[in-house]
Amino acid sequence: MKLFSLAGDVAFVTGAGSGIGQRIAIGLAEAGADVALFDLPGSAGLAETKAAIEAHGRRALVTEGNVTDEAALAAAVAATEAELGSLDLAVNSAGIANAAPAEDLPLAQWQKMIDVNLTGVFLSCQAEGRAMLKRGKGAIVNIASMSGTICNRGLTQAHYNSSKAGVIHLSKSLAMEWVGRGVRVNVISPGYTLTPMNKRPEVAEQLKIFASETPMQRIAEPDEMVGPAIFLLSPAASFVTGVDLLVDGGFECW
């Protein structure tokens, strides 16, 4: 359907070397977009993502850097526009996760979480937004988490939860700043999903509990974030901005 087609669009995806970011990047190509990939230098998954995109007949560009590096993001967006064309779409999925009791949480650990998960999303949106606002057209999707709204039972991750809550409100704030300038900004908040983050040692033993606490009685697959991303980026969502789309198997209902 044309409503959900991204044919002719150019997209930029952070965190494209693994997990949700990787799967969404490939999904955007399946929907017709050419895709620039951004992740840490040496990220092993970038080549895999690029090959999968090209297998779908779309162009892919690998760019590298840290989302906390303003200059690297600006250079990556500039390279995207030079190689693939004007930037239309962006998905910001780069992030980290870890756990520690709040009373013992070192300041450096707190700060790194905020730097990557929140400041990194802001800097990514800023670089992408600057390109899109020049033409008065664009759509951005930021990947947050249901942990930005709820507190996960049994997990000591105040720093992670706070960073994701920040992503949600940042996205709404940008959506309202840019609402009259042609750029939409929305959020996907996944529930428990089988990504490298949720295969961490401190989480692995709890996966069965997470599934049992989810109304759908299972953990999501990264593939299940592709449809929501395509919807929010596509013409089908032309009147949608500032929305936090929960993709959590009904978790927040319980």
Image (cartoon, rainbow, N blue to C red):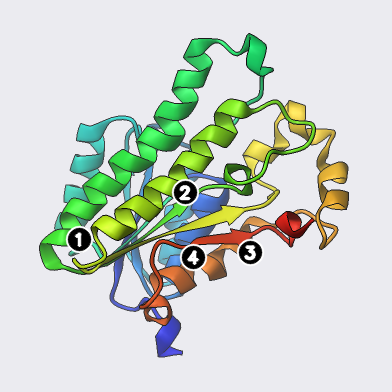
Q: Describe the element under mark 1 as helix, strand or loop.
A: helix
Q: Going from the N terminus, do you reach mark 2 or mark 4 first?
A: 2
Q: Residue at x 32, y 34 (%)?
A: 65
Mark 4–mark 3 CB contact (< 8 Å) = no
Q: Is residue 141 left or right of residue 107?
A: left
What residue would you read off at disc 1? 132
User: What is the CA distance from the residue labelled 2 to the residue labelled 4?
Assistant: 15 Å
SS at mark 3? Answer: helix
Say which label, 4 or 3, has the lower sequence index. 3
Three-letter amino acid code at the position of disc 1: Met
Give the residue furthest to the bottom: 1
Q: Which mark is residue 229?
A: 4
**Eyeballing the image, is 25 above or below 6?**
above
Viewer-closest of 41 and 1? 1
Q: Earlier in the sequence, mark 3 or mark 1?
A: 1
Q: Is residue 7 visible?
A: yes
**Residue 65 or residue 170, whichever sits in front:** 170
Relative to residue 85, is residue 119 drawn left or right? right
Measured as percent of width and height from the top left, residue 76 is found at 24, 44
Q: Would you say 88 lies left or right of 145 here? A: left
State the residue position of label 3.
224
Mark 2 → mark 1, Cα distance in angstroms: 20 Å
At label 3, counting other C-alpha atoms closer than 10 Å, the crowd grade (few under 14, some 14-19, many 20 or more) is some
- Give me the C-alpha separation between circle 3 and circle 1: 27 Å
How far apart marks 1 and 4 lie (CA) works out to 18 Å
Pointer 2: residues within 10 angstroms few (<14), some, or many (20+)?
Answer: many
- The quarter in which the C terminus is drawn is bottom right
Amino acid type assigned to the residue bearing label 4 in the image: Ala
Residue 87, position as x, y percentages in the image: 23, 62
At a point 42% along the width and 86% down the height, the residue shown is 3
Reply above or below: 147 against 35: above
